[in-house]
Image (cartoon, rainbow, N blue to C red):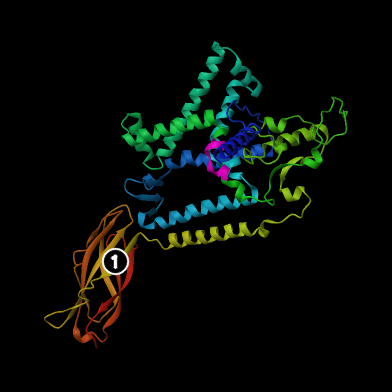
Amino acid sequence: MNQQSEKKEMGEVTTLYHEFETWTVNTGGQTIHAKRMPGFFRTFKDRAQLALWLPFFFLPYLRWNDKQAILFDIEHRQFHFFNLTVLPQDIWMLSLVLLVAAMTLFAATSVASRVWCGYFCFQTAWTDWFTWLENRIEGNPTARRKLDEAPWSFDKLKKKVLKHLIWMLIAVLTGISFSIWFVDAFDYWNQLLHLQLPLVGWVVLLMFFLGTYILAGFMREQVCFWLCPYARIQGVMTDTQTILPTYDYTRGEPRGKIRRGGEVVAPQGDCIDCFQCVQVCPTGVDIRNGQQLGCITCGLCIDACDVVMDKIGKPRGLIRYASLDELSGKPKKEMYQHPRTLVYIAIILLALGGIVWGLTHMGAMTLKVVHERQPLFVQMSDGSVQNKYDFKVLNKTDHDLHVKVSAEGGVAGQLIIGAENQPITHHGRGTSFTIFVKAPAKSITKDVVPIQFRVESAEDPNVFAEYTSKFYGPNR
């Protein structure tokens, strides 16, 4: 039994080994130098990356009321967005934001596969910028391969050093840009230039520098293949109705070369086996071999193929965005006919509704009142009844405020004790104080009556909060 088990295990290992040998994925043995060709998807990719990631670099420098407009202030546990300040008590809204982001990613994948990877992902964007610089400094893919294989010379050293210095500069700016989302941008630059950053600041900067420089400059597509979990799970979020870059096998096969005069050597499909679709692919995928792990749905192969089709007088669309069902002749379904996508959209709308509700109901001050339970009330020597309340006021503004306490409802002739000196509430955190409400016994007609408390800033009446509690008295 043991020998049979060992033989079975060895057979499985051998099978996996041979399967690995047949993979069409570049496993890092060679550097992919993708060709850059103009086209609709190339333009869309460039603009989408700039639209998403330029704000990452520049938004932290935006000022509002003499302070940074957008700041994730971890040290003081606050998030500032212009006039809005979100504290840890409102962290549930961040959870909804993350839920919206996740569901949007899932919905997009369900409809159009890995469009996030192809056009917006930070790894894709930084790698694209790095390779664009490489193309500008070292030349086209053929020139870059020759330069890599050439012996070291002054020209090669000059180009390599210049390229890596610019890569390092981008990596440093990436680390700085990330850091200033969490601390004041101008204070950070002042500390950095004077080499006075705290230890955590240097650690974060070094981590982002190395991460950007290594992942975008050297690993490139290998990050998508081996490190990114999304590449592994996206297969379960797509189906035969998902549209993605697809090679029309029926139209393109059999492949064959054409002569200069356009003469066809043998009966063949529209694919002339020019390999332009492979040469422009940033991950080195041959889309003609079907859907693969390495395809990031960027559509650059569509641009390349369309250019070739134009040159040889064939209709565009040999490689195009299409579903597998569409290519097999099955009826095409619209997006609203995908139940899974509709579920994603419903979750997104519910989460967005929760965020909007939270933002519109999140004032600059919140109040919570806890009634003393033991005893519920105290009978005073003059016959009056007194209740005790613990006030917890959260001041969400950026400065301390004195508050006035008032109450509506309750008992006629009631008196508020303990707030005569207008308690101070500290900015960015909660403040607790005790309030007593005293009412004459003759005015108490019920054993429990509602009472609504209001705390209002003495400096700014527009900053206030209300809370409804109860006033207890003897049984009547």
User: Does 132 sit above or below residue 353?
Assistant: above
| Quarter of the picture holding the C terminus | bottom left
**Which residue lies at the image location 23% right of the left edge and 70% below the top edge?**
389
User: Does 118 sit above or below residue 164?
Assistant: below
Q: Is residue 403 left or right of residue 340?
A: left
Give the magenta range: 223-232
Residue 263, x across and y down, in percent: 88, 28
**Which residue lies at the image location 35% right of the left edge and 46% below the top edge?**
74
Q: Is residue 310 left or right of residue 448?
A: right
| Quarter of the picture holding the N terminus | top right
Q: Residues within 10 Å of mark 1 (few under 14, many from 20)?
A: many
Instruction: Identify the residue under disc 1.
Output: 455
The answer to whether one can see residue 87 in this image is no
Q: Secondary structure at mark 1?
A: strand
Residue 173, x across and y down, in percent: 45, 32
Instruction: Give the quarter of the image for residue 284.
Output: top right
User: Does 236 sit above or below residue 20?
Assistant: below
Q: Is residue 82 left or right of residue 458?
A: right
Amino acid at circle 1: Val
Residue situated in front as seen by the camera: 299 or 269:
269
Magenta-colored segment: predominant secondary structure: helix
Q: How many marks?
A: 1
Instruction: Give the quarter of the image for residue 128.
Output: top right
**Which residue lies at the image location 38% right of the left edge and 50% below the top edge?**
79
Residue situated in front as seen by the camera: 398 or 352:
352
Q: Is residue 375 magenta?
A: no
